[in-house]
Image (tube, rainbow, N blue to C red):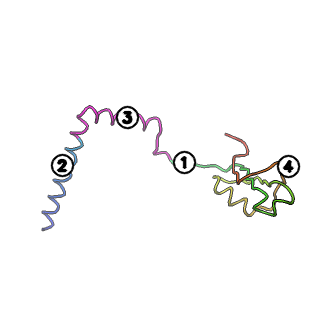
Amino acid sequence: MSKTNKNEEAQRQLQLAKLDEMLWLSTPLGKFMSSMSQQAKKVFPSSKTHRYTQRDWVVRIPNSFVTDSSKGSPGFQTVVTAETPDQALEAASVSNTWEVLDFSVSDFQVFPNTPL
């Protein structure tokens, strides 16, 4: 098959796909679905990029991840500055300032220090 034949075949396929789409959009279900997707775009604009800002995160860990849980405190916490919870956990892993808690911590917890 020559290059011009391939181009013509590709052009016909594009025209058929466009006609297929136009036929679908002319049906009641197609009209309904296209209106739903347009409304969803207005409510949830997915084209926006998420821009994170630095904020304080509290990271808590149970005692069992640090020492023998039968001795000492029930858990530890530190406050770090990061953009996301994942980055906060990484920053906490190198932190040297941990506060001893007087209540039990059952698992890792990462949450904002002050809610937005």
Q: Which residue is mark 4?
A: 102
Q: Position of residue 111 (x, y in %)?
A: 69, 47
**SS at mark 2 in the image:** helix
Q: Quadrant of the N terminus?
A: bottom left
Taking 84 as reference, is 42 left or right?
A: left
For label 4, count other residues whose C-alpha is less than 10 Å away and answer few (under 14), some (14-19) or many (20+). Answer: few
N-terminal label among 3 and 4: 3
Disc 3 and disc 2: Cα gap in Å?
A: 25 Å
Based on the picture, tell me whether residue 85 belongs to the magenta stretch. Answer: no
Predominant secondary structure in magenta?
helix
Q: Which residue is mark 1?
A: 50
For label 1, count other residues whose C-alpha is less than 10 Å away and answer few (under 14), some (14-19) or many (20+). Answer: few
Taking 113 as reference, is 39 left or right?
A: left
N-terminal label among 3 and 1: 3
Residue at 71%, 53% in the rendered image:
107
**SS at mark 1 in the image:** loop
Disc 2 and disc 1: Cα gap in Å?
A: 37 Å
Q: Nearer the viewer, mark 3 or mark 4?
A: 4
Disc 3 and disc 1: Cα gap in Å?
A: 24 Å
Q: Which residue is mark 2?
A: 16
Q: Position of residue 95 (x, y in %)?
A: 77, 61
Are the residues at dot 2 and dot 1 in contact (C-beta closer than 8 Å)? no
Based on the picture, tell me whether residue 35 belongs to the magenta stretch. Answer: yes
Q: Magenta segment range?
A: 22-48
Residue at 17%, 60% in the rendered image:
7
Q: Position of residue 69 (x, y in %)?
A: 81, 59
Which amino acid type is marked by label 4?
A: Asp
Which amino acid type is marked by label 1?
A: His
**Residue 6 in which image quadrant:** bottom left
Residue 36's label in the rendered image is 3
Choose between 54 and 87: the one closer to the eye. 87
